[in-house]
Image (cartoon, grey):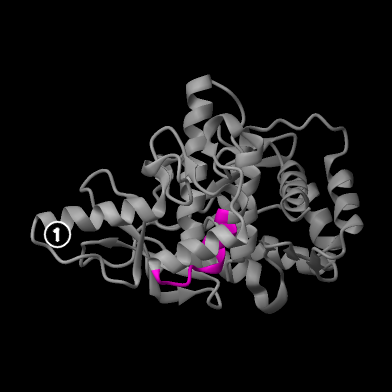
Amino acid sequence: MVNINAKFNRCLKLIEKYPQAFIVGKGSTENEILEIENRLRITLPTMYKEFLRKFSYLATHDEEIWGINPSNNQLDIVFRNKKYNEELRSSSQSEIPSHLIGIQVEDFNSSLVCLDLHAMTYNDQDAKVCFYPSDEPYYADSFTQVLFEVCDSAVSSYLDDKENVPSPSIEKVSEIKTERKDVYSEAKALIHAHPELSEFGEGISDAEVEVIEKELKVTLPKSYVTFLKEFGGGIFGDNQFFTMFNDELVKTNLELYHPTEYEHALSKHLVAFYFDDLEEFYACLDFKNVRNGEPKVVYREVNVPEEDYDDQDAFKSFSDFLYYIVQDTIDVNG
């Protein structure tokens, strides 16, 4: 299950690291937030109120998330919802239902992007997001998901414009080059230094490694074998490394090679060993790209054909990937 607070913290890190990509406020007080709730006659979702506390509002090159900004009506949630209702009335349309609160306008069809207060989720911490007017299903499973997509897009656009490297977006982080001599040992040390984030199990045996290799018809690289024999897989923060428990590692890959729900399968030269449920991708050892006995690590999503990926977008080894994930998790939870 997605950890909604971890995803929100990732948004904070993007904004902190690339302030040039954003226009944000200084944060709103509890009294200011309460005043907005009273004026709108609603109770705002916890995650949206946390956004207001941190930033008040947000704007990027081509997107906005409305909040509290009396000095700029275009970014003020009360003004924009009031204005949208006036436009609806002027065209003899019904006003926005009271349980929907607009937070931005969708550019393509001028629909309002709304928090649906009748569709609370993540233990009532957040609200699903929908278009109004529209009969379509929900646009996003939470406000935090919308915030993340806006932040991720803004950073990617900023870096593209500046021809800079690298984006902290998970699709871009593989461009990071690690120059350390013993990356695996550094990652291992970080794992041991943060037991509060680690839910790794016991290491597996040589015999169990052989079973994996036989079932998946590969010879696993030394760095990944070392990880399996020392940690066996499990959870670090919100990051899931597949384990041998109930044959999870083998079964996951066999299911991806022969999917029943999707048109496109995982290519058999790839071995998925990690799943990110925040952004819904697999990290895979790529046995078509091997250097010094170490296959590169690439990202793959379900039902996306192999030809749609750039082979250059990869970590050079499992150790590099492990170090990045561990360090990033520590930063996000720090």
Local crowd size for mark 1, using a 10 Å CA cut-off: few (<14), some (14–19), many (≥20): few
Q: Nearer the viewer, residue 70 or 4?
A: 70
| Residue 71 visible somewhere in the drawing | yes
Q: Say above or below: 264 vs 289.
A: below
Q: Is residue 230 magenta?
A: no
Residue 3 or residue 107, whichever sits in front: 107
Residue 6: x and y in percent read 65, 59
Residue at figure coordinates x 21%, y 63% from the top left:
134
Q: Is residue 296 above or below residue 242?
A: above
Examine the image and state in which quarter residue 298 appears.
top right
> From the viewer's perspective, is residue 94 above or below residue 219?
below
Residue 267 in view, yes or no: no
Q: Residue furthest top?
A: 163
In the rendered structure, the answer to whether residue 225 lies left or right of residue 304 reads right
Residue 43 covered by magenta stretch: yes
Where residue 131 sits: x, y (%)?
28, 60
| Element marked by disc 1 | helix
Q: Residue at x 88, y 38 (%)?
A: 182
Name the quadrant of the N terminus: bottom right
Read off the residue under disc 1: 89
Q: Position of residue 27 (x, y in %)?
A: 60, 49
Q: Residue 2 falls in which quadrant of the image? A: bottom right
Callout 1, which amino acid? Arg
Is 250 left or right of 334, judged from the image as shown? left
Magenta highlight range: 41-52
